[in-house]
Amino acid sequence: HLGPKRSRWTRQLGASAIQIGSKLAAGLGRIGDEEIGFSIAYLKSALRASHISLQCLKICREKSLLPPKAIDRITARLIDVRDEIVGEVMSLREQWNTRFGM
């Protein structure tokens, strides 16, 4: 519970975290290979949302809006998720290049 310290930055952090999840679901939920391009686009959108979340965490730390240990845990997990997204995008790009010869 954020109580009185709830701010624009904590709200943005929550909103961008939701976006990460929804964009990941859309990007990873493709049915066939013909949708690789859409998957890449959704995953890149999730990547942008993760960067926004990391920026919000930095501001939350500077303004002491969340406990430092919580910020550390969330930051570490976001970096893991971001790295996994980058890996998946690279894999999909390889599939795209193999399939379509570009």
Image (tube, rainbow, N blue to C red):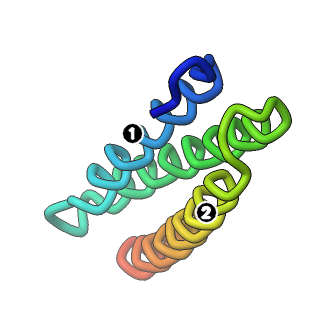
Q: Secondary structure at mark 1?
A: helix
- The residue under the point 35% across, 56% down is 39
Left or right, 41 with reference to 62: left
Residue 11 vs 21, above or below: the answer is above
Q: Residue furthest left?
A: 31
Of residues 95 and 64, the one nearer the viewer is 64
Q: Residues within 10 Å of mark 1 (few under 14, many from 20)?
A: some
Q: Secondary structure at mark 2?
A: helix
Residue 96 vs 78, above or below: the answer is below
Q: Amino acid at mark 1?
A: Ile
Of residues 4 and 81, the one nearer the viewer is 4
Of residues 94 and 58, the one nearer the viewer is 58
Residue that numbered label 1 is attached to: 18
Residue that numbered label 2 is attached to: 73
- The residue under the point 56% across, 65% down is 77
Q: Amino acid at mark 2?
A: Arg
Left or right, 30 with reference to 61: left
Of residues 102 and 31, the one nearer the viewer is 31
- The residue under the point 51% across, 72% down is 84
Percent coordinates x, y for residue 54 in the rendering: 68, 47
- The residue under the point 45% across, 48% down is 41
Percent coordinates x, y for residue 29 in the rendering: 21, 59
> How far apart are labels 2 and 1 at the CA level?
17 Å
Q: Which comes before the other along the chain, label 2 or label 1?
A: 1
Q: Quadrant of residue 5?
A: top right
Q: Residues within 10 Å of mark 2 (few under 14, many from 20)?
A: few
Percent coordinates x, y for residue 13 in the rendering: 56, 35
